[in-house]
Image (cartoon, coloured by chain):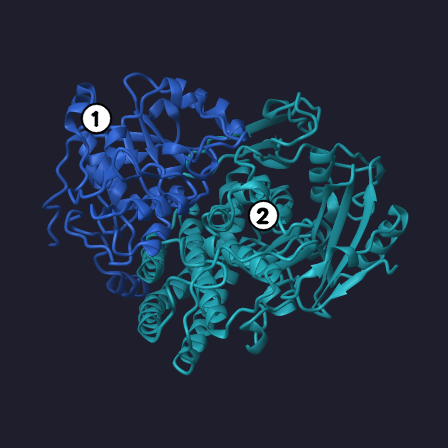
Amino acid sequence: MKDTLIISDTSLPVSLAEIPVTAYALFRQRVLTAMADENMHCVSYFAFPDDGEYRFICILADDQTHQLCLMGHRDQGPFLSLTADNPAFHVFEREIYERTGILPEEHPWLKPLRFSVDRQNSHKGMDHYPFFNIAGDELHEVGVGPVHAGIIEPGHFRFICHGEKVLHLEIQLGYQHRGIERMMESSRGGLSHALLAESIAGDSVIGHASTHAAVIETLSGSRLSASLSIERAVALELERIAMHTGDSAALCADVAYQLGQVVYESLRTIIINTTQRWCGNRFGKGLVRPHGTWFPLNEDLGRIICNNLDAVMERLLPMVDRLFTLPSVVSRFDGTGAVSRSQMLAVGAVGMAARSAGLKRDIRWSHPSMPWKETAFQPVVLETGDVMARAMLRKIETEQSVSLIRHWIDQIKEQAGAIEQPDYQRTLLPDALAVQLTEGWRGEICHVAITDKHGKIMCYKIIDPSFHNWMALALAVRMQEISDFPVCNKSFNLSYCGHDL
Amino acid sequence: MIKEINILGKHGWQYIPDLEDVTLPETFRGRPVISDAITNEEAVRLKECCPVYAIETSPVFSIHLGKCLFCGECSHVCPDRIRFTNDFRMAVTREEHLVIKAGSAEPVYPDVLAIRPEIRRLFRHSLKLRQVSAGGDNSTEMELNAAGNVNFDMGRFGISFVAAPRHADGIVLTGPVTANMAHALRMTWEAIAEPKILVLAGTDAISGGLFLKNTAIDRSFLSSIKPDLYLPGNPVHPLTVIHGLTALMGVRIRGGIPRK
């Protein structure tokens, strides 16, 4: 049997029997060899119970060949961790250990991940997190959260500081754990799964809902129509523009630049109200459903979207021009919270954060689905990896998304086809796996579903980009002033609920 | 300086002067209206389609706004029978008022008699709130933020969110209350001085939504404390938030502030 299964088209389901199961030593060697190439990164690595043992599946993405590599092993007992040689796996192996109790030996940072409800060690809970500490009379610790000063999700941040300088930040998550993955395996079916997908992260409704819909469509063996794929792509880019604009407002607020804050805030209102006009919800809930849509993107809507984007850009451009030349803003953004390219690579960072530090990782380019496949798209990559780069990236990506939307809306006029309605009843192929990747505004979203012999979902794995990127934030604030933490945090704007699931 | 003037000129006036005088687009899914011509067969079909059990068929057909995710699926199953209107005024002070019965097209309003007298006496001109997210998906949280932004400007009524429970008059809770957050929620509540209010924002907070029967959820906090205000929505719209909070305080929002 081969040790690696390579797939080039994710819109086709994979038979579970085709996915290699090799001895762990061989698996480990293959994964580490593949990951030595920096064009490879891990999109998902998880375990699920199978015949009294655990079956492990690891999915690596190759950015150059646009393919996915699937590998696997079957184990009950401890194994030598991948993290010992490649730190990008730390978070995957921590999750596996928490849920299965199988020890990844020599893992350098084997901390609880989220104290999930299905954890093996149920004696330990949120109050038992083993924080790293440094001894020294001149050092002090600062604890923040889980409830924060603003209106934001909960998480606990523990800083070890020397004076104002942060030596180390440890982030404890899990407060938001709702057990979504287990529910995806047991809920009442089609519609409730679609609704669950929408609430994985309320700031990435379109990203997660369209990834979920694509997984279900793949497992039902159906192909998406051109108009439906364009509709989802437009909605995804609108979500990106809205979140980038909202984050820019928050970045301005964190450096006390009030004009920037209020202008960006009011522009975000226009964008999310456009989504509301389209589907009745400012975050796009209800817009994406498997196999069809209740809110077809017609020419009228296309015109409204374009007009609103014109109005936004007219006010956005002078604001951007001012923001990035204003000394009081530039001095706070420039060089703050820098993460180097090699650090991003080491922790396995994805999406916007990775691109801000010179790492070209963008699913729209590396593993494009329709309509990106037919669109000449090049991701924006900046070099400095600091708050300035992440702010600037938002600006450039906003402009890029606006022109993508205009381009696709022009195409709608040509193809007025039949409108498909959502369908929640279709049967899924048995013993199959579907994997889908979407570049949400924050980064890559990966959903994997596996069906049993009756075509029922027995394993559903969700990876939000925040899962990869929280460690990058912890690195960003090292040796920074603790007062710069808010602006560093906002420049990443990672999801708590997307991580905790 | 010229750049700033140019930006401000284009920015113009952003606040909505009269928050009562806002019409949301027809697509917005707010307070539902149910036809009383609904047949038994339709009622059963509608009840079955709802994944969060928001629909009851007896004694009369009804939709529970605190359970409803406003996905609108039932209105697609029977478009002649259920229609979601664009009315965002859905805040109530009594849980039983969350139930919208077939045949009722009456607007929903908070029941003044259910409001504790000290709330209006003490908080009428200033209401400072602490927000606790306990498993919220960040959409309701963002809408609560938006309620205070330049467009909706909740601060004009003296309402704002504060950075510490010691400064707060109450909690706005979002999310179904995860077991991992239950302790922190209780501690925050205990840190607030009496008298204090509890506001449940969004379907997840009001009923648990999709997560109700999940073991990762621990809603025991809500079994001992009676909420003062329910704000339905998924997520709750900023206008629903402001409409509800001002009604609780006894502040009139009609008229607003004239432009110039």
Q: Is residue B179 above or below residue A32?
A: above
Spot occupied by residue A419 in the image (x, y as percentages of width and height): 41, 70
- Corner quadrant of residue B167: top left
Give, as a three-letter code, the residue at label 2. Ser
Q: Is residue B188 above or below residue A304?
A: above
As rendered, which of B251 and B221 lies closer to the eye? B221
Spot occupied by residue B174 in the image (x, y as percentages of width and height): 40, 35
Tell me the chain of label 2.
A
Give the mark toward the camera: 1 or 2: 2
Residue placed at 15% from the left, 28% from the top? Answer: B112
Q: Residue furthest bottom?
A: A414
Question: SS class of the residue under badge 2?
Answer: helix
Q: Are marks 1 and 2 on the same chain?
A: no
Give, as a three-letter code, the residue at label 1. Phe
- Quadrant occupied by the C terminus of chain A: top right
- Corner quadrant of residue B62: top left
Q: Is residue B235 visible?
A: no
Whether residue A317 sits left or right of residue B24 in the image: it is: right
**Residue assigned mark 2:** A466
Q: Is residue B219 above or below residue A380?
A: above
Spot occupied by residue A242 in the image (x, y as percentages of width and height): 41, 58
* Callout 2 crowding tier (Cα within 10 Å): few <14, some 14–19, many ≥20: many
Whether residue B116 sits left or right of residue B215 in the image: it is: left
In the rendered structure, the colour chosen for chain A is cyan
Q: CA distance from mark 1 to mark 2?
A: 39 Å
As rendered, which of A219 and A160 lies closer to the eye? A219
In the rendered structure, the colour chosen for chain B is blue
Tell me the chain of label 1.
B
As rendered, which of A430 and B112 lies closer to the eye? A430
Spot occupied by residue A83 in the image (x, y as percentages of width and height): 78, 44
Q: Which mark is residue B123?
A: 1
